[in-house]
Image (tube, rainbow, N blue to C red):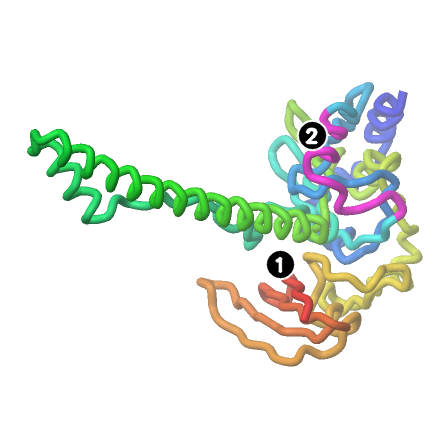
Amino acid sequence: MRATRLALTLFLLPSGLFAQSEAALRDYFEGRYVTVKIDMPATKDGVEVYPLEARPLDLQQYSRRIKTHGTALQKGDAVMVTLVRVKEKNIEFQLGGGGFGTLFDDSGEVVYGESVPKTKREKELEAELKRVSDKDAKKSIERELRDLRSERSREEAHLRAEAAQAEEARKARVRQQALGAGSRFNLRFPSGVPVTSSTPEAIMLALADYVEFADPEQRQTVSGAAAGPANRPLSATQPATFRKGMSLEEVASAFGSPESCSAKSEGALTLTTCVYRLPEAHAEGQFVDGVLVRYTIASE
């Protein structure tokens, strides 16, 4: 029923809206705060929505992603639209950074337990065992070899235990990072994105069951629409928390001026690293051209 309503609405949209470009969509949505009506998975895979289908949301896939990745945004959370991207067969509607797994996210290397190589003495004894024929000498060599191999086995077990502990710590760190990295909606059109589906009105209608949008007239008070994206203040309902997609000014507004900042060039991009003092902790944020792309928080 909703898909039929959407198709009819698209048909009735004024022809002037059909030519909306990605740039126009980004100008309309990015920097606005919206309120999610459903929990959002903590992954860049986000939520798949098929606007022209009778059942737009695949509930089984949605449930799997929530169970697998956890919840980055909860129902009722206010969050900034950080990117709208139009592709050949889908439209990405990114919230709070777009979800963990995007550019500059660091999940770290998987930690494996290293094997312990044979010692020089163990290799010598193995070679000697092949040469000697005396039974007593063989037994003596075999006893020493057993002791050396047991010691090596214990050391490998210790390294495996340390690696397992480090791997669990890595997974916990990744999970924590993912919870603050936002999420996204992927509007899917298997036959290609129709021009009529790439308008603000069409996108808001397609996401109406999952996102609450402020009226365009309220943009000034909700997200500071008159200012550029980098100068928009945090919404009064937005909690003081780091989220990918925040500007340097927004982070400073929420947590105060940084203790220090350093900048370096990464190709055509400028990577700025700032350190912030928090209650009983400190945070390090990395910004690309003034937009937060990665952060870490460590207790003192």
Above or below, comparing residue 13 to residue 290 in the picture: above
Residue 212 at x, y = what percent?
A: 89, 44
Query: Label 2: how many residues lie within 10 Å, few (<14), some (14-19) or many (20+)?
Result: many
State whether residue 14 appears in this view: no
Q: Residue at 29%, 44% (x, y): give it.
A: 148
Segment tinted magenta in the rendering: 61-76
Q: Where, by quadrant of the figure, is residue 293 drawn?
A: bottom right
**Residue at image mark 2:** 188
Q: Where, by quadrant of the figure, is residue 147 drawn?
A: top left
Above or below, comparing residue 135 to residue 158 in the picture: above
Residue 220 at x, y = what percent?
A: 88, 63
Magenta-span inclusion, residue 88: no
**Residue at image mark 1:** 293
Query: Label 1: how many residues lie within 10 Å, few (<14), some (14-19) or many (20+)?
Result: many
Q: Amino acid at mark 1?
A: Val
Q: Describe the element under mark 1 as helix, strand or loop.
A: strand
Residue 268 at x, y = what percent?
A: 47, 63
